[in-house]
Image: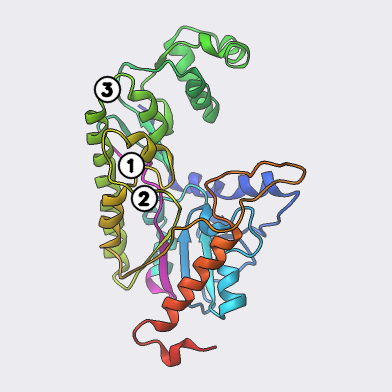
């Protein structure tokens, strides 16, 4: 079985791919902090701040110039640290000792974004790194060959496992992935690394919906325990930030794939309420406002799951309203 990737290795890569892919249009001014490349301008852990906002690319602000933390500073006079990074999960947060120490001792109030839960454990898969898991269930088969191709393309080691499983040369497999995808063998080998939602999409063809629900709830329980540990370790007021537009229905046999594949993945209404109950306060931006980002010379919106610039501005406004009205805020924190 594959081993879990060292946390330092995973952290070293965060956000770098964003800068490389988007450098023709955006300069995220990446700088090193807590073993990660965070979005600049650079700041020191010793500098005073009001809020430390931790989350995924939603906090980072991919394709956004005036992201959440800039909006808070420029329009509301609130100094907020942007600790947004790709692949953020509660597990990655708590494993980053430098970050946890900073959140615990900083004078700034920690704000943690509600993240996807697809990096957790179940009887069918185990945590691998960040939002990825490794398949442990034997005999998973799917006729969705494009899904198999996408899983193989995500991780080089998946290609090795799959080729060995099916007695193929890697060159032969790569040619098939390019030219004859429908001829790919249906079985996905144990050890395949992917997001849990993608594996569940395949697993549903050989397991019942009821069994899928059981495993998803086990993943949720694993993730909820990590949130509890974060709150316990920090031992202070911690705020939950929700930035998504997903319909938070309760997980059932008819909608489990919807919850498995849409952000926040593997989070449904009941699980969301359980998470909310752990935090001192919750700030939400759940409505879609503004237009999605479009790349130059392209008509289609790019990545429909990222928040718009208007959603960043709206979230900043709601955070500012809470910050000024919270109990004990001196003079409503007028600045």
Q: Residues within 10 Å of mark 3 (few under 14, many from 20)?
A: few
Q: Whole-percent x and y of residue 176?
A: 58, 11
User: Mark 3 and 2 residues: CB-CB less than 8 Å, in contact?
Assistant: no
Q: Residue furthest bottom?
A: 331
Q: Residues within 10 Å of mark 2 (few under 14, many from 20)?
A: many
- Which one is closest to the eye, mark 3 or mark 2? 3
Q: Whole-percent x and y of residue 268?
A: 32, 47
Judge by depth and name the residue closer to the eye, 19 or 66: 66
Labelled disc at residue 120: 1
SS label for mark 2: helix
Q: Residue at x 52, y 70 (%)?
A: 316
SS label for mark 3: loop
**Location of residue 199 with respect to 105 vertically, above or below:** above
Labelled disc at residue 207: 3
Quadrant for residue 124, please give it: top left
Judge by depth and name the residue closer to the eye, 113 or 130: 113
Residue 107 lies in the magenta-colored region = yes
Q: Residues within 10 Å of mark 1 (few under 14, many from 20)?
A: many
Whether residue 111 can be seen here: yes
Question: Magenta stretch?
Answer: 104-122
Magenta residues, dominant SS class? loop
Quadrant for residue 276, please give it: bottom left
Q: Residue at x 53, y 30 (%)?
A: 154
Q: Whole-percent x and y of residue 182?
A: 52, 11
Name the residue beneath numbered marker 2: 91
User: Mark 3 and 1 residues: CB-CB less than 8 Å, in contact?
Assistant: no
């Amino acid at each position: 079985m594959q081993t879990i990737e060292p946390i330092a290795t995973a952290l070293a890569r965060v956000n770098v791919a964003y800068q490389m892919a988007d450098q023709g249009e955006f300069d995220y001014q990446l700088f090193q902090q807590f073993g990660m490349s965070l979005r600049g301008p650079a700041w020191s852990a010793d500098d005073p701040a009001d809020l430390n906002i931790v989350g995924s690319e939603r906090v980072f602000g991919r394709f956004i110039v005036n992201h959440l933390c800039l909006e808070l500073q420029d329009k509301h006079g609130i100094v907020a640290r942007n600790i947004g990074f790709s692949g953020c999960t509660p597990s990655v947060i708590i494993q980053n000792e430098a970050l946890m120490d900073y959140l615990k001792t900083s004078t700034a109030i920690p704000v943690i974004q509600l993240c996807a839960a697809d990096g957790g454990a179940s009887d069918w898969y185990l945590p691998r790194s960040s939002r990825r898991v490794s398949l442990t269930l034997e005999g998973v088969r799917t006729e969705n060959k494009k899904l198999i191709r996408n899983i193989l393309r995500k991780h080089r080691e998946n290609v090795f496992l799959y080729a060995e499983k099916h007695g193929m040369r890697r060159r032969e497999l790569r040619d098939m992935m390019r030219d004859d995808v429908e001829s790919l063998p249906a079985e996905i080998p144990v050890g395949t690394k992917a997001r849990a939602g993608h594996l569940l999409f395949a697993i549903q063809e050989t397991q019942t919906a009821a069994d899928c629900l059981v495993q998803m709830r086990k993943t949720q329980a694993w993730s909820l325990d990590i949130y509890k540990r974060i709150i316990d370790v920090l031992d202070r007021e911690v705020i939950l930030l929700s930035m998504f537009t997903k319909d938070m229905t309760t997980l059932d046999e008819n909608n489990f794939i919807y919850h498995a594949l849409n952000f926040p993945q593997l989070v449904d209404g009941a699980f969301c309420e359980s998470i909310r109950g752990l935090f001192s306060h919750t700030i939400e931006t759940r409505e879609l406002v503004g237009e999605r980002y479009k790349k130059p010379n392209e008509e289609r919106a790019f990545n429909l799951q990222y928040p718009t610039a208007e959603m960043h501005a709206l979230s900043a406004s709601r955070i500012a309203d809470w910050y000024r009205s919270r109990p004990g805020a001196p003079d409503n924190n007028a600045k």
